[in-house]
Amino acid sequence: MPTQRSGDARGGGTSRRGFLAALGSVGTVSALSGCVGNVGSVADAGDGGTARNPVSVLAAGSLQLAFSEGLRAAVDGPVQVEAHGSVTAARLVAEGKRDPDIVALADTALFDRVLPADWHAEFATNALVVAYDDVSETGRRVGAADRWFDPLLADDATLGRTDPDLDPLGYRTLFALDLASEHYDRPGLREALTDPRGVYPETALLSRFETGDLDAAVVYRSMAEDRGYDYVDLPAEIDLSDPARAAAYDGVSYDLPSGEAVRGAPIAYGARARSGNEPVAEAFETLVGGEYLRDHGVVVPDEFPEYSGDVPRGHRP
Protein backbone atom coordinates (compact mmCIF):
# COMPACT_ATOMS: atom_id res chain seq x y z
CA MET A 1 0.00 0.00 0.00
CA PRO A 2 1.41 3.45 -0.87
CA THR A 3 2.58 5.60 1.99
CA GLN A 4 -0.05 8.11 3.07
CA ARG A 5 1.20 11.46 4.29
CA SER A 6 -0.38 14.56 5.70
CA GLY A 7 1.17 17.94 5.03
CA ASP A 8 -0.19 19.11 8.38
CA ALA A 9 2.31 16.85 10.12
CA ARG A 10 5.16 18.97 8.84
CA GLY A 11 6.32 21.63 11.26
CA GLY A 12 4.61 24.90 10.50
CA GLY A 13 2.21 23.28 8.00
CA THR A 14 -1.30 24.54 7.39
CA SER A 15 -4.47 22.91 6.09
CA ARG A 16 -5.65 23.48 2.52
CA ARG A 17 -8.49 25.68 3.67
CA GLY A 18 -6.21 27.59 6.03
CA PHE A 19 -3.68 28.17 3.28
CA LEU A 20 -6.35 29.50 0.93
CA ALA A 21 -7.59 31.87 3.61
CA ALA A 22 -4.04 33.05 4.24
CA LEU A 23 -3.56 33.77 0.55
CA GLY A 24 -6.64 35.93 0.55
CA SER A 25 -5.52 37.83 3.63
CA VAL A 26 -2.21 38.89 2.14
CA GLY A 27 -3.55 39.62 -1.33
CA THR A 28 -1.48 37.14 -3.31
CA VAL A 29 -4.01 36.55 -6.03
CA SER A 30 -1.23 37.02 -8.59
CA ALA A 31 0.54 33.95 -7.21
CA LEU A 32 -2.41 31.78 -8.21
CA SER A 33 -2.59 33.21 -11.69
CA GLY A 34 0.96 32.11 -12.49
CA CYS A 35 3.00 35.19 -11.67
CA VAL A 36 4.17 36.73 -8.43
CA GLY A 37 6.08 39.98 -8.38
CA ASN A 38 8.01 41.61 -5.59
CA VAL A 39 7.41 45.01 -7.15
CA GLY A 40 7.51 46.82 -3.84
CA SER A 41 10.77 45.34 -2.68
CA VAL A 42 13.22 48.00 -3.79
CA ALA A 43 14.82 48.72 -0.46
CA ASP A 44 16.66 51.70 0.92
CA ALA A 45 20.39 51.04 0.57
CA GLY A 46 20.97 52.67 3.92
CA ASP A 47 23.47 55.29 2.91
CA GLY A 48 22.28 58.59 1.58
CA GLY A 49 18.80 57.20 1.00
CA THR A 50 19.76 55.67 -2.37
CA ALA A 51 17.94 52.58 -3.57
CA ARG A 52 19.32 49.48 -5.25
CA ASN A 53 17.58 47.88 -8.20
CA PRO A 54 16.15 44.46 -7.27
CA VAL A 55 17.69 41.27 -8.60
CA SER A 56 15.06 39.82 -10.94
CA VAL A 57 14.41 36.06 -10.79
CA LEU A 58 12.24 34.22 -13.32
CA ALA A 59 11.35 30.94 -11.64
CA ALA A 60 9.50 27.66 -11.92
CA GLY A 61 6.01 27.85 -10.43
CA SER A 62 6.83 25.09 -7.95
CA LEU A 63 9.54 27.33 -6.47
CA GLN A 64 7.27 30.35 -6.07
CA LEU A 65 6.81 30.13 -2.30
CA ALA A 66 10.39 29.09 -1.62
CA PHE A 67 11.72 32.06 -3.57
CA SER A 68 9.19 34.73 -2.63
CA GLU A 69 9.51 33.84 1.07
CA GLY A 70 12.75 31.94 1.75
CA LEU A 71 15.08 33.37 -0.89
CA ARG A 72 14.00 36.96 -0.40
CA ALA A 73 14.57 36.65 3.34
CA ALA A 74 17.99 35.06 2.83
CA VAL A 75 19.35 37.59 0.33
CA ASP A 76 20.88 40.83 1.62
CA GLY A 77 19.12 43.07 -0.87
CA PRO A 78 15.87 43.38 -2.84
CA VAL A 79 14.73 40.46 -4.99
CA GLN A 80 11.88 40.48 -7.52
CA VAL A 81 10.33 37.09 -8.30
CA GLU A 82 8.14 36.13 -11.26
CA ALA A 83 6.90 32.53 -11.47
CA HIS A 84 5.54 30.50 -14.38
CA GLY A 85 5.61 26.93 -15.60
CA SER A 86 9.23 26.25 -16.52
CA VAL A 87 8.60 25.67 -20.22
CA THR A 88 6.77 29.00 -20.37
CA ALA A 89 9.54 30.72 -18.40
CA ALA A 90 12.23 29.35 -20.70
CA ARG A 91 10.29 30.44 -23.78
CA LEU A 92 9.76 33.95 -22.42
CA VAL A 93 13.52 34.39 -22.14
CA ALA A 94 14.36 32.60 -25.40
CA GLU A 95 11.89 34.83 -27.29
CA GLY A 96 13.19 38.02 -25.66
CA LYS A 97 9.98 38.73 -23.74
CA ARG A 98 11.75 38.64 -20.37
CA ASP A 99 15.29 39.63 -19.42
CA PRO A 100 15.79 38.39 -15.83
CA ASP A 101 19.05 38.40 -13.92
CA ILE A 102 18.52 34.77 -12.90
CA VAL A 103 16.50 31.93 -14.44
CA ALA A 104 15.58 28.93 -12.25
CA LEU A 105 13.79 26.02 -13.95
CA ALA A 106 12.29 22.75 -12.74
CA ASP A 107 14.06 20.72 -15.43
CA THR A 108 17.73 21.14 -16.34
CA ALA A 109 16.99 19.64 -19.78
CA LEU A 110 15.24 22.90 -20.72
CA PHE A 111 18.62 24.65 -20.74
CA ASP A 112 19.49 22.45 -23.70
CA ARG A 113 16.17 22.12 -25.50
CA VAL A 114 14.27 25.40 -25.04
CA LEU A 115 16.65 27.97 -23.57
CA PRO A 116 20.16 27.01 -24.77
CA ALA A 117 22.76 27.94 -22.18
CA ASP A 118 26.48 27.28 -21.96
CA TRP A 119 26.29 26.59 -18.23
CA HIS A 120 23.92 26.06 -15.32
CA ALA A 121 23.90 24.87 -11.72
CA GLU A 122 21.82 21.89 -10.60
CA PHE A 123 20.64 22.77 -7.11
CA ALA A 124 17.66 20.67 -5.94
CA THR A 125 15.54 17.58 -6.56
CA ASN A 126 11.97 16.54 -5.85
CA ALA A 127 9.46 13.70 -6.20
CA LEU A 128 5.95 13.33 -7.59
CA VAL A 129 3.09 12.55 -5.20
CA VAL A 130 -0.70 12.32 -5.48
CA ALA A 131 -2.37 14.95 -3.32
CA TYR A 132 -5.95 14.16 -2.35
CA ASP A 133 -8.86 16.13 -0.96
CA ASP A 134 -9.54 14.79 2.55
CA VAL A 135 -12.95 16.51 2.50
CA SER A 136 -14.36 14.57 -0.47
CA GLU A 137 -15.33 10.90 -0.30
CA THR A 138 -13.33 10.03 -3.40
CA GLY A 139 -10.32 11.91 -2.06
CA ARG A 140 -10.37 9.98 1.20
CA ARG A 141 -10.63 6.72 -0.75
CA VAL A 142 -7.56 7.69 -2.78
CA GLY A 143 -5.65 8.16 0.45
CA ALA A 144 -6.76 4.79 1.85
CA ALA A 145 -6.50 2.66 -1.32
CA ASP A 146 -3.85 0.00 -1.95
CA ARG A 147 -3.58 1.41 -5.46
CA TRP A 148 -4.21 5.16 -5.42
CA PHE A 149 -5.73 5.20 -8.91
CA ASP A 150 -8.45 2.62 -8.34
CA PRO A 151 -10.92 5.05 -6.67
CA LEU A 152 -10.33 7.59 -9.43
CA LEU A 153 -11.20 5.00 -12.07
CA ALA A 154 -14.18 3.59 -10.17
CA ASP A 155 -15.72 6.99 -9.43
CA ASP A 156 -14.97 8.50 -12.84
CA ALA A 157 -13.24 11.35 -11.03
CA THR A 158 -10.86 13.82 -12.67
CA LEU A 159 -7.20 13.72 -11.69
CA GLY A 160 -5.89 17.28 -11.75
CA ARG A 161 -2.61 17.84 -13.57
CA THR A 162 -0.71 20.61 -15.28
CA ASP A 163 -0.26 21.27 -18.98
CA PRO A 164 2.71 19.29 -20.35
CA ASP A 165 3.24 21.97 -22.99
CA LEU A 166 3.78 24.62 -20.30
CA ASP A 167 5.78 23.04 -17.50
CA PRO A 168 7.77 19.94 -16.51
CA LEU A 169 5.24 18.89 -13.85
CA GLY A 170 2.78 18.31 -16.70
CA TYR A 171 4.98 16.04 -18.78
CA ARG A 172 6.40 14.36 -15.67
CA THR A 173 2.84 13.44 -14.71
CA LEU A 174 2.49 11.67 -18.06
CA PHE A 175 5.84 9.96 -17.48
CA ALA A 176 4.64 8.76 -14.07
CA LEU A 177 1.40 7.39 -15.51
CA ASP A 178 3.28 5.50 -18.23
CA LEU A 179 5.68 4.09 -15.65
CA ALA A 180 2.73 3.23 -13.37
CA SER A 181 1.10 1.21 -16.16
CA GLU A 182 4.17 -1.01 -16.23
CA HIS A 183 4.75 -1.05 -12.47
CA TYR A 184 1.17 -2.03 -11.63
CA ASP A 185 0.69 -4.12 -14.80
CA ARG A 186 -2.28 -1.90 -15.66
CA PRO A 187 -2.17 -1.12 -19.41
CA GLY A 188 -3.80 2.11 -20.56
CA LEU A 189 -3.58 3.87 -17.20
CA ARG A 190 -2.40 7.11 -18.75
CA GLU A 191 -5.30 7.21 -21.21
CA ALA A 192 -7.81 6.34 -18.47
CA LEU A 193 -6.69 9.14 -16.13
CA THR A 194 -5.83 12.02 -18.47
CA ASP A 195 -9.15 13.80 -18.95
CA PRO A 196 -8.40 17.10 -20.75
CA ARG A 197 -10.84 18.81 -18.36
CA GLY A 198 -8.33 18.23 -15.57
CA VAL A 199 -5.47 20.19 -17.16
CA TYR A 200 -4.50 23.57 -15.68
CA PRO A 201 -1.53 25.94 -15.53
CA GLU A 202 0.62 24.98 -12.53
CA THR A 203 -0.51 27.64 -10.08
CA ALA A 204 -4.13 27.44 -11.29
CA LEU A 205 -4.05 23.73 -10.45
CA LEU A 206 -3.30 24.63 -6.84
CA SER A 207 -6.15 27.11 -6.81
CA ARG A 208 -8.65 24.50 -8.05
CA PHE A 209 -7.39 21.94 -5.55
CA GLU A 210 -7.52 24.45 -2.71
CA THR A 211 -11.17 25.23 -3.37
CA GLY A 212 -12.14 21.54 -3.43
CA ASP A 213 -12.87 21.36 -7.17
CA LEU A 214 -10.54 18.36 -7.59
CA ASP A 215 -10.50 15.05 -5.72
CA ALA A 216 -6.80 14.50 -6.39
CA ALA A 217 -3.88 16.07 -8.23
CA VAL A 218 -0.34 15.11 -9.17
CA VAL A 219 2.07 17.61 -7.61
CA TYR A 220 5.62 17.78 -6.34
CA ARG A 221 6.13 16.56 -2.79
CA SER A 222 7.52 19.97 -1.85
CA MET A 223 4.29 21.65 -3.01
CA ALA A 224 2.19 19.25 -0.93
CA GLU A 225 4.29 19.71 2.19
CA ASP A 226 4.62 23.46 1.78
CA ARG A 227 0.85 23.85 1.54
CA GLY A 228 -0.27 21.22 4.03
CA TYR A 229 -1.91 18.83 1.55
CA ASP A 230 -2.66 15.22 2.39
CA TYR A 231 -0.87 13.04 -0.15
CA VAL A 232 0.14 9.55 -1.20
CA ASP A 233 3.82 8.79 -1.78
CA LEU A 234 4.43 6.97 -5.07
CA PRO A 235 6.94 4.13 -5.47
CA ALA A 236 10.44 5.13 -6.59
CA GLU A 237 9.76 3.30 -9.85
CA ILE A 238 7.19 6.01 -10.63
CA ASP A 239 7.95 9.22 -8.73
CA LEU A 240 11.07 10.25 -10.74
CA SER A 241 13.10 10.81 -7.59
CA ASP A 242 15.73 8.05 -7.77
CA PRO A 243 18.98 8.68 -9.73
CA ALA A 244 19.66 4.95 -9.65
CA ARG A 245 16.56 4.44 -11.83
CA ALA A 246 17.55 6.97 -14.48
CA ALA A 247 17.78 4.31 -17.20
CA ALA A 248 14.24 3.08 -16.48
CA TYR A 249 12.86 6.62 -16.43
CA ASP A 250 14.50 7.28 -19.80
CA GLY A 251 12.10 4.84 -21.42
CA VAL A 252 9.29 7.44 -21.51
CA SER A 253 9.19 10.73 -23.40
CA TYR A 254 7.02 13.65 -24.52
CA ASP A 255 7.22 15.90 -27.60
CA LEU A 256 6.85 19.62 -26.90
CA PRO A 257 4.93 21.74 -29.44
CA SER A 258 8.27 23.08 -30.67
CA GLY A 259 9.21 19.57 -31.76
CA GLU A 260 11.77 19.13 -28.99
CA ALA A 261 11.49 15.83 -27.15
CA VAL A 262 11.93 15.60 -23.39
CA ARG A 263 12.68 12.24 -21.82
CA GLY A 264 11.99 10.82 -18.41
CA ALA A 265 14.77 11.47 -15.90
CA PRO A 266 15.24 12.03 -12.17
CA ILE A 267 13.76 15.40 -11.22
CA ALA A 268 16.44 18.10 -11.17
CA TYR A 269 16.13 21.88 -10.75
CA GLY A 270 18.65 24.10 -12.49
CA ALA A 271 19.51 27.79 -12.43
CA ARG A 272 21.66 30.18 -14.38
CA ALA A 273 22.72 33.75 -13.69
CA ARG A 274 22.54 36.02 -16.72
CA SER A 275 24.49 38.90 -15.23
CA GLY A 276 27.85 39.01 -13.49
CA ASN A 277 27.37 42.03 -11.25
CA GLU A 278 27.93 41.61 -7.53
CA PRO A 279 24.29 41.73 -6.30
CA VAL A 280 23.29 39.10 -8.88
CA ALA A 281 26.27 36.89 -8.03
CA GLU A 282 25.45 37.08 -4.33
CA ALA A 283 21.76 36.33 -4.91
CA PHE A 284 22.62 33.43 -7.22
CA GLU A 285 24.99 31.91 -4.67
CA THR A 286 22.22 32.05 -2.06
CA LEU A 287 19.63 30.71 -4.49
CA VAL A 288 21.61 27.57 -5.29
CA GLY A 289 22.95 27.23 -1.72
CA GLY A 290 19.87 25.34 -0.62
CA GLU A 291 19.36 25.99 3.08
CA TYR A 292 16.11 27.93 2.69
CA LEU A 293 14.83 25.35 0.17
CA ARG A 294 14.81 22.60 2.79
CA ASP A 295 12.38 24.68 4.84
CA HIS A 296 9.97 24.49 1.88
CA GLY A 297 10.07 20.72 1.38
CA VAL A 298 12.54 20.75 -1.53
CA VAL A 299 15.25 18.07 -1.44
CA VAL A 300 18.83 19.37 -1.56
CA PRO A 301 21.43 16.55 -1.74
CA ASP A 302 24.64 17.15 0.18
CA GLU A 303 26.71 17.29 -3.01
CA PHE A 304 24.62 20.10 -4.52
CA PRO A 305 24.95 22.52 -6.17
CA GLU A 306 26.61 20.83 -9.13
CA TYR A 307 27.81 23.00 -12.01
CA SER A 308 27.79 22.06 -15.70
CA GLY A 309 29.38 23.78 -18.68
CA ASP A 310 31.64 26.82 -18.92
CA VAL A 311 30.83 28.60 -15.65
CA PRO A 312 31.89 32.27 -15.64
CA ARG A 313 34.52 33.28 -13.12
CA GLY A 314 32.09 35.32 -11.02
CA HIS A 315 29.81 32.33 -10.52
CA ARG A 316 32.28 29.50 -10.05
CA PRO A 317 31.88 27.53 -6.80
Image (cartoon, rainbow, N blue to C red):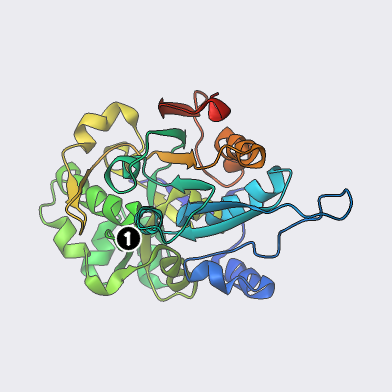
Residue type highlighted by circle 1 = Leu
Q: Is residue 140 above or below residue 233?
A: below
Residue beneath the point at 48% across and 54% down: 99
The part of the image, by quadrant, that contains residue 213 is bottom left
Horizontal and vertical percent position of residue 203? 45, 65
Q: What's the residue at 19%, 51% (across, down)?
A: 254
Residue at image point 33% right, 42% down = 116
Look at mark 1 in the image and give the residue it sits on: 166
In the picture, residue 42 is in which quadrant? bottom right
Image position of 8 (left or right of 140): right
Vertical placement of 85 versus 27: above or below? above
Residue 277 placed where, x, y %?
A: 62, 39
Q: Where residue 39 appears, x then y in whole percent?
A: 65, 64
Indicate the quadrant containing the C terminus: top left, top right, bottom left or bottom right.
Answer: top right
Question: Is residue 8 visible to the viewer in this orientation of the structure?
Answer: no
Relative to 181, residue 289 above or below: above
Occupied quadrant, residue 37: bottom right
Looking at this view, is 6 or 261 the one in front?
261
